[in-house]
Every structure is written in C-alpha cells, then in structure tokens.
Image (spheres, grey):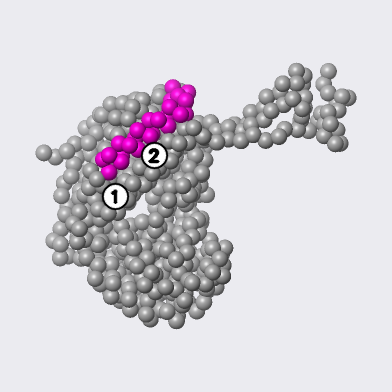
Amino acid sequence: MTMRYRNYIGGEWVDAHSGATFEDINPANEELLGLIARSDAQDADAAVEAAAKAYPAWRLTPAPKRGEILFRVGQFLLERKEELARLLTREMGKVLPEARGDVQEAIDMAFYIAGEGRRLLGYTAPVELPNKFGMAVRDSVGVAAIITPWNFPIAIPSWKIFPALIAGNTVVFKPASDTPMLAAEFVKIFEEAGLPAGVLNLVTGPGGEAGEALLHHPLVKIVSFTGSTEAGTHVAVEAAKTLKRVSLEMGGKNAVIVLDDANLDLAVEAILWSAFGTTGQRCTACSRLIVQQGIQPRLTEALVERTRALRLGDGLLPTTDVGPVINRRALEKIHAYVQIGQQEGARLLCGGDIYRDSGQGFYYLPTLFDRVQPDMRIAQEEIFGPVLSIIAVKDLSQAVEVNNRVAYGLSSSIFTQDVNAAFRAMRDLTTGIVYVNHGTTGAEIQFPFGGTRGTGNGHREAGQTALDIFTEWKAIYVDYSGRLQRAQIDTGAFGETSVSGQAG
C-alpha cells in the first residue's frame, strides 16, 4: 500500500485543501515511495494563521521549558537514528553512512540549542549616569518561514527550526519536494515530544505555490532559506517588499588547494570525499582542485585511479561508494556541464557520462577534468554533481587568487606542511569556512556556517550566530535615581552629574 503524507497545521494532519498530491520517488531505482500533499497558497495561509495564533503563548513559555521539549526531540532522534537514516537514503539517495551523519547533525543541533533555553545570552554594560542600570536582551520576532533543500533533508531543517523555536518564534516549515517524507517524520517527533499545536507547521509541495505564498504573507516576519543562488535572490527581493528578515544560504564553488609539499595520500583521500561524497550534491562539495605544478602529475594519476574504482549503486548497499543524484533534471544538468567543459577545451580524464548499467535510477559517473582554466564555466558555475576540475598554478599566491575569483565564497581548503603557507591561506582565502589539511566538506554545529559573496547575505547558521536571525535585540534601561536624568546632557566634563543641567 502506498503511503500518504499530509500537511501538519495547527496540530492536525490534514490533506491539501484541494486534495491534490504528488509522487515521491526513490532516485536509486525510481520506486514510488509515497503520495504527498500538494499544497498551494491557501494551505500556506492556513499554516501561517495557525503559527500566528500559537505565537503569543509560545513566546511567553519560559525558555528553559522550550529547551526541555527540544531536548526530548533530540532523544527521540537518537533512538530512531537508524530508521530515519534508512528513509533518508531511500528518499534522497546518499549512502547510508552519510545518511546517519545527516541525522546525527540534527541530534547534535537539538541538544546544543536545547541548552540555549538556559542561556539566550544578552549582556549588561556600564551606563553613563548614577543610579541607573542597562542591559540588552534577546526577544522573539514572530512567525518564521523555513524553506529547506533536499540534499541534507534533516540536518539543514534542524539548523533553522531549533534556533527559531528556542527563541520563542513559531514556524511554518516548507521542505523540498524531493524529500517531504523525511520532513513529515521529523515533524512527528516534535509532536510526540509535546510541542504545542501550531508552534510548528508543515506544508509540502512546489515552492512556486506554497513557498511563494510564504514570502508574501504579512504575518511571516522571518524567512530562512537554503537553496540555489537564483532562488535565494528571488526570496530576498520578494521578502524585502514587506520588510521581512531574511537569511540566505546559497551556492558554492569550493576549492581544495594542494601545494607541492602536501601529504599526497591524505590529500587524495580528502579530495575524493569532498568531490564525490553525497555524489557532489553539497554546497560545500569540492568542485575545483587548485594544484601546484610540481605535485600535479602524481596527484592527478592517483585521483584518476581512485575515481575509476568508485562503485555506484543504491545507497543502502554496503558495497556502494557513490549513490544516485536526486532526479532526472539533475542528471541532465550535470551532463550538460560536462559537455560544456569538453567544448571549452578541458580534458576529460574519466567519467563524463550517465551511468546506465543499473537500468533504473539517476546515476552519473564520477568525473575528472584537467587542463581547466580558471575562467571556464565549469570552473566558475555551480554544477552540483560529481564533477571535479583540476586547475594548475605555480605558487600559493596564484592559488589564493584563483580560489577567490568566483562568485561564491562558502568553503576552501589547503594541503601543506608549511605552517607559514597555512597561515597565509587562513588569512587570505575569502570564504566563510577554511580548512587546513582537510577537505571542504563537513561542519560542526558549534561553529558558524555560511559564506561570502553569492553564497549568502551575511548571516550564519549554527554556533553562537544561530540565534541572530531569529531574535531582536531589546535595550532596557532602569533608572532608580528617583529623578529625571538625561544621558549625554546631565554630565559634566569629567562625567559628574551637573546640578544646573538637571530638569526641574
């Protein structure tokens, strides 16, 4: 029997008001996984209204109590990690060990943010006048629209939903249409953990319908979006029309730099993981290898050998190294870029074609190019697939210049044994994340995640910055002098209160 998944609005699981559904497909074998509610503007409006109705009570719920609910969510995620990971692999395609890591990130984020229920740190500072106290505290904002992609279908929602809730906001969650089942299972855990009705709402369906409605709804105060730069730019423009707060996490064109003195074996392992992990479908994936000329021949030879040996298949199989891409559109886009690379004059070393031996599913052969020039399209534009371009440089200075000369600025990496070179790279690489002797993928939730240029709009997720987009700063002054004091006016040359300057 085909599973049917509904929206979650105001504490109830409901069909789309139109009754329409769409199919959720396993990218490994094109199996029908379930029928999903196809929401439109009317469903999005209902979810926002439910969130707005729940907001006053949730805002006044003590933050430690909000944290206790999120801690229970983390416990349930931990207990169901394997079940969720296996569903994630079936729905999205990544290999099972990576799916477990995706769920683990949500577990880590739940426990980390639950602790903020007893912090939500503001600050105090000295004030200018006697018998007066000043402090700055965080306040909630209102209804947050959370719009997330398919490639990390539980980790990325956790980066957004947990901080939004702990800060006292209510949420409408619109997941990608390629991974709605996992989103529904995630929301069920909040329900089981005792989250009050209406605090978290789920609407599934195309972004052009439900998502667009969220951008324009007057009761939505925050939009947190992760996806393509093109879509994110649209979000920013539309949300600005009603002065919504907007956080954007968008594309990447990440590079690993390998200098002549690098540990070759370590670099090869890291590059393979960075370029072909999650089948290259990561915003942090390495799609450019910037290599110093002395080590280039040995590094290229080793990478070609290892890349050809990677095994494609269903991510649930222990023999699989690289799973499918998310859908047929992605498959065709990747192949189009490979053809562009060949037309531009890059040399194809291996891969370069759709993998057809599986019969069904959306597989692309891990692909390596060399003789890539920094201004080629395959070296500038986000491909979002298992395609790696090798760019030769003469020294560190040129490597840094090539790294920074793209429209994105999410993650970069350098392999070197020279501490001076490492610190120069740490200083000069203009990306939001920098790795030394490690690949470009992987992030820990206690540090800020995000990038520069076309990767985002300046906000960061996770770490101490997680609460920034979801809170307003409120400055509070308490004057216990018993008389009117005027800062900047009622002070003398040496900061003493001036009697003549006091109001009568």
The quarter of the picture where the C terminus appears is top right
Mark sitting on residue 110: 2
The quarter of the picture where the N terminus appears is top left
Image position of 395 (left or right of 288): right
The amino acid pointed to by label 2 is Ala
Question: Residue 170 appears in which quarter of the rendering?
Answer: top left
* Residue sitting nearer the eye, 361 or 154: 154
User: Looking at the image, which residue is at 36% across and 72% down?
Assistant: 265
The amino acid pointed to by label 1 is Arg
Q: Which residues lie in the magenta part?
A: 57-81
Dot 1 falls on a residue whose secondary structure is helix
Residue at the disc numbered 1 = 100
The reply to whether residue 114 is in sight is yes
Crowd rating for badge 2 (residues with CA inside 10 Å; few <14, some 14–19, many 20+) = many
Q: How many marks?
A: 2
User: Looking at the image, which residue is at 17% across and 38% down?
Assistant: 3
Q: Position of residue 279 (x, y in %)?
A: 29, 60
Residue 154 lies in the magenta-colored region: no
Q: Position of residue 444 (x, y in %)?
A: 43, 51
User: Looking at the image, which residue is at 47% across and 32% down?
Assistant: 117
Residue at far left of view: 1
Image position of 100 (left or right of 224): left
